[in-house]
Amino acid sequence: MPAAAGAQSGTVRAFWDAQAAGDAAAARAVLAEDLEWTVAGRHSGLARTYRGREAFFGELIATLSATFEPGSAVMDIRGIYEDTARSTVVTHLRETARTRTGLEFDNEIVTIMTVEDGRITACREFMDLHEVRRTFGGDTADPHQM
């Protein structure tokens, strides 16, 4: 697995490790307060921009936590690629989890993160939204309804 060894990729790895461990405090520590996290797409209520660290945790992460069985999420990092000159880290990972209703979630995810002064300031997250809709539900007529 190709992986960058720079400080920016270390910040991103610390975030994913904290998420996998369910350590919200450690995850918060590497996110900027004014974080802008975008789940790209239109056909899922999760696909939108979360402005601020508190919105990210209070909306996106809270939805994941309410849906997934505690301790079932596994984040398998397939690669971390760093462009130091642009303060950008690209991560490829596979996330699997089990919902509280017994569905299996399995999704390939790519994130493009901006890291400044040791904090993640922005992220664009790309994933299979059909898998998200299958797992979380939702009406295709309203892309913001789940």
Image: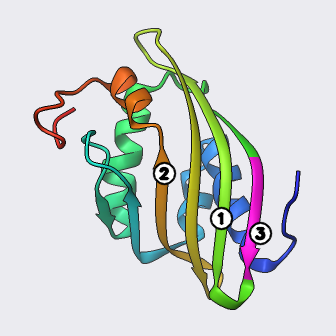
Q: Relative to residue 62, is residue 138 depicted above or below?
A: above
Decide which of tag 2 and tag 3 comes sooner along the chain: 3
Q: Assess disc 2: are there few (<14), some (14-19) or many (≥20) residues with their C-alpha within 10 Å of its C-alpha.
A: some
Rendered residue at 77%/69% (across/down)? 10
Q: Which residue is mark 3?
A: 10
Name the foreground residue: 146 vs 110.
110
Q: Amino acid at mark 3?
A: Gly
Badge 2 marks a residue whose secondary structure is strand
Q: Which residue position is annotated with label 2?
A: 126
Answer left or right for 1 relative to 142.
right
> Is residue 69 rendered magenta in the image?
no
- Number of marks: 3
Rendering coords of residue 43 (x, y %):
26, 40
Q: Badge 1 is on which residue?
A: 90
Q: For the point 67% across and 45% down, which residue is it?
A: 93
Classify residue 86 by image quadrant: bottom right
- Label 2 and label 1: CA atoms lie apart by 11 Å
**Image: magenta residue range:** 78-83
Residue 88 pos. (x, y %): 63, 77
Q: Could you tell which of marks 3 and 1 lies nearer the N-terminus?
A: 3
Residue at image coords 31%, 44%: 46
Find numbered disc 3 in the image and state the secondary structure of the residue it sits on: helix
Label 1, residues with CA under 10 Å away: few <14, some 14-19, many ≥20: many
- The colour scheme of the drawn protein is rainbow
Residue 25 vs 43, above or below: the answer is: below
Q: Which mark is residue 74?
A: none
In the structure shown, which secondary structural element does the residue marked by tag 1 occupy? strand
* Residue 79 part of the magenta-drawn span: yes
Residue at point 41%, 64% (across, down):
37
Could you say where residue 80 lies in the image, as x and y percent from the top left?
75, 60
Q: CA distance from mark 2 to mark 3?
A: 21 Å
